[in-house]
Amino acid sequence: LAADLGVSRVTVGTAYAELESAGLVVAAVGSGTRVAPVLPTTAVGAAPGDRRGGTWPAWQGSAETSEPAEAGPRGPDVVAFTGVGDPAAYPVAEFGRTIRQVLAREGAAALSYGPDPAGDPSLRRTVTQLLASQGIGVPPESVLITSGSQQALALVCQVLVRPGDTVLVEEPTYDLALRLLRAAGAQLVGVPVDGHGLRVDVLAELLERHRLLDRPRPRLLYVVPNFQNPTGASLSGSRRHALLELARVHGVPVFEDDFAGDLRYSGRATPAIKSLDDGGHVLYAGTFSKLLMPGLRIGYLVVDGPVRQRLVEAKQVTDLGTSLLLQRALDRFVTVGRYQTNLRRTGRLYRERRDALRSALAEHLPDAGFALPAGGLFAWVALPAGVRSDTLLRAARDRGVDVAPGSRFFLRPEDGAGHIRLNFAVQPQERIAAGVVRLAAAVDSLRVT
Ligand code: PMP
């Protein structure tokens, strides 16, 4: 049957196993597989609303909080200024070779759980070498390997944040951090961002007010200091010093999310806040998602002090450790220098795309506000007066171009009505101008004349 249908035996076998475990078929030795005489009341894959024969138990709650996927139109003719990096830049063949080399050298050992839930010791050492080039000098014991930096933040929420705690965030900021912190029950308080990153003067006033009113101190400050998502802004050196001082004085831990710190296209690197921290005030998260590929799901958290062991414990009980095979392959990819070559190649590619976006915006949307980001993936565009990002999103999608509306990145969506975020790294250079021409047409259709 498998051969006749042109599908593999594995696919057919898996399908039968799923049907059997759902009680839809019964298998009997010698007489093959038949449809079950009495079908169960819940069909495989049924949506909650479709449930036959009863309602869901109370612990399931309702699905009200789950937002629809943010996917816009897709297809060869769509210019999507959304997503992460460009899959065409992923080192598919080289990484495949690396995985085969690891399996040939290490065999079954690379397919085990691994000796330490905090991560493969060799990869942790390698991460400290990468961090040393950023001015962060820490021992491998301070590094906890996580499933992407998203898990690093999730673990910190699990260990530090209790429902009702105040957490300070930049505004605007990375939307899935907002959703994660909200899911942990945090009360979010926004601190504005300008062209030089988080407004540390506003943060100082806010913390002082908290202190004077004798409010419980905020449990965390979440900050993206390099090429921030969504604004592309980088926190200035003097603000980094001031921010750390405030964290120290007010006893507020800082979560420094450096999701794309090595993707710099112009200007000089500013030291990480963690590199200035000698008192254990900063939890620093990095990731290989933007610098290499997101499907690896490998990131890390640098953390010192007593909280470290609680985070390792949380990591262990959550998933028993990140895939050892992928950790071993990544370690080899970095230590033989393939990672660095790939990073240089990706950096060149994305810089050209950033510059192409700048020229296209200057030519086709000259009255939109735009500050050139020094690195990363994102450009933040202030729309011409009277044009709202939610209506623009629809008009843009109708014309085959996709963008992220600013509303997604604010505590009150309305505050983002005047902005959109463009990811310039995803599209080949020659399609960027075409995308901006379509975007400009969408903006023109909404201008108030
Ligand atoms: N931080 C920021 C600012 C991000 O934009 C993202 C993903 N886009 C992440 C963290 C999480 O990425 P990952 O879990 O893949 O490391």
Image: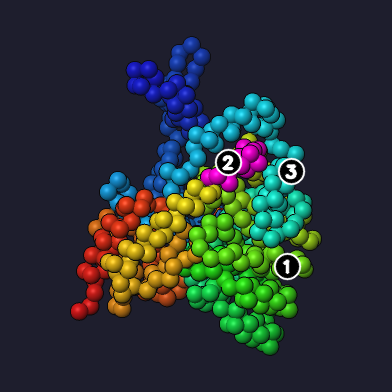
The amino acid at mark 2 is Arg
Identify the mark nearer the N-term, 2 or 1.
1
What residue does disc 3 label?
A: 121
What residue does disc 2 label?
A: 338
Percent coordinates x, y for residue 144 in the rendering: 70, 51
Between circles 3 and 2, the one closer to the viewer is 2
- Identify the residue at horizontal 23%, vertical 65% (top origin): 441
The secondary structure type at the circle numbered 2 is: helix
Percent coordinates x, y for residue 41 in the rendering: 44, 39
Residue 200: in sight, yes or no?
Answer: yes
Identify the mark nearer the N-term, 1 or 3.
3
Nearer to me, 326 or 344: 344
Q: From the image, which quarter does the C terminus lie in?
A: bottom left
Magenta stretch holds residue 271: no
Rendered position, 221 above or below 99: below
Residue 243: in sight, yes or no?
Answer: no
Nearer to me, 219 or 436: 436
The tag on residue 358 is none
Rendered position, 97 above or below 278: above
- Distance from disc 2 to disc 1, alpha carbons, whole Å, reads 31 Å
Rendered position, 272 above or below 215: above
Magenta stretch in the rendered image: 328-342
- Identify the residue at horizontal 44%, vertical 26% (top origin): 11
Picture quarter containing residue 323?
A: top right
The tag on residue 277 is 1
Percent coordinates x, y for residue 35 in the rendering: 41, 25
- Distance from disc 3 to disc 2, alpha carbons, whole Å, reads 20 Å
Nearer to me, 212 or 362: 362
Rendered position, 273 above or below 424: below
Nearer to me, 271 or 199: 271
The amino acid at mark 1 is Asp
